[in-house]
Amino acid sequence: MDPMKGQGVFLEVAALLVDRLPDCMFVLVGRRTQEQEETYLANAHQMGLSGHLVLVGEVDNSIGAINSFDVLVSCSRYGEGFSNVIAEAMACGVPVVATDVGEAGLIVGDLCPVVPAGDVEAIAEATCRLLEVGSVRPDDLRERVVSNYSVDNLVDATLRLLSNLNP
């Protein structure tokens, strides 16, 4: 739990979405203290999310968790550079709603919506659109990440930059 990750915003988004999509479930993955978990669950209960929220602790292999999602929602508020979880979700073929923090827009390109940080209604609307329309092809998501952020591409780009330093 870290304020920069926007978990509070995620709860507000979930509260809006559960009204529109009463069968939806929300999953929050990551490390937290017992006190943080109790506070988060109490807030979720007050927002009408009992029975709609699952908290999962830190996982060693995020692929299993991500593959269970219909949409990954990244509610980061600030402080992100390259958000690994956005790229990981896309590599798994899972569409993403991301806030305009760090390199999120560069990672998703024109495949997924990028909305202003902290804008609960915009995040909820973008999430709803992805769930209802399902217009993003999983292969396109994966291809974007593989073609732009694979280890081979990173090595090639680094070698090009280094070779330019010593002509």
Image (cartoon, rainbow, N blue to C red):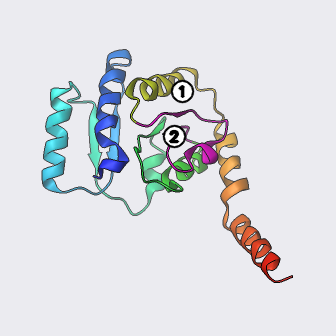
Q: Is residue 113 magenta?
A: yes
Report the side of 156 relative to 117 (left or right): right
Residue under label 1, please give it. 130
Instruction: Kindly identify the amino acid type of the residue bearing the numbered disc 1.
Output: Leu
Observer-nearest of 13 and 164? 164
> Which residue is located at x 46 percent, y 53 percent?
80
Q: Which mark is residue 103?
A: none
> Which residue is located at x 67 percent, y 67 percent?
151
Name above or below for residue 119 compared with residue 93: above
Q: Quadrant of residue 163?
A: bottom right
Instruction: Kindly identify the amino acid type of the residue bearing the numbered disc 2.
Output: Asp
> Which residue is located at x 16 percent, y 30 percent?
45
As helix, strand or loop, the secondary structure at mark 2 comes to loop
Image quarter of the C terminus: bottom right
Name above or below for residue 128 compared with residue 25: above
Residue 116 locus on image (x, y percent): 48, 33
Mark 1 to mark 2 CA distance (whole Å): 17 Å
Report the side of 151 relative to 7 (left or right): right
Q: Is residue 107 magenta?
A: yes
Q: Which range is magenta?
A: 94-117
Q: Which mark is residue 100?
A: 2
Observer-nearest of 54 and 17? 17
Residue 8 locus on image (x, y percent): 28, 38
Q: Quadrant of residue 19?
A: top left
Q: Farthest right residue?
A: 167
Residue 30 locus on image (x, y percent): 32, 54
> Which residue is located at x 52 percent, y 50 percent?
102
Q: Can you tell which of label 1 and label 2 is closer to the viewer?
A: 2
Q: Quadrant of residue 121?
A: top left
Report the side of 128 relative to 36 (left or right): right
Q: Between disc 1 and disc 2, whose residue precedes?
A: 2
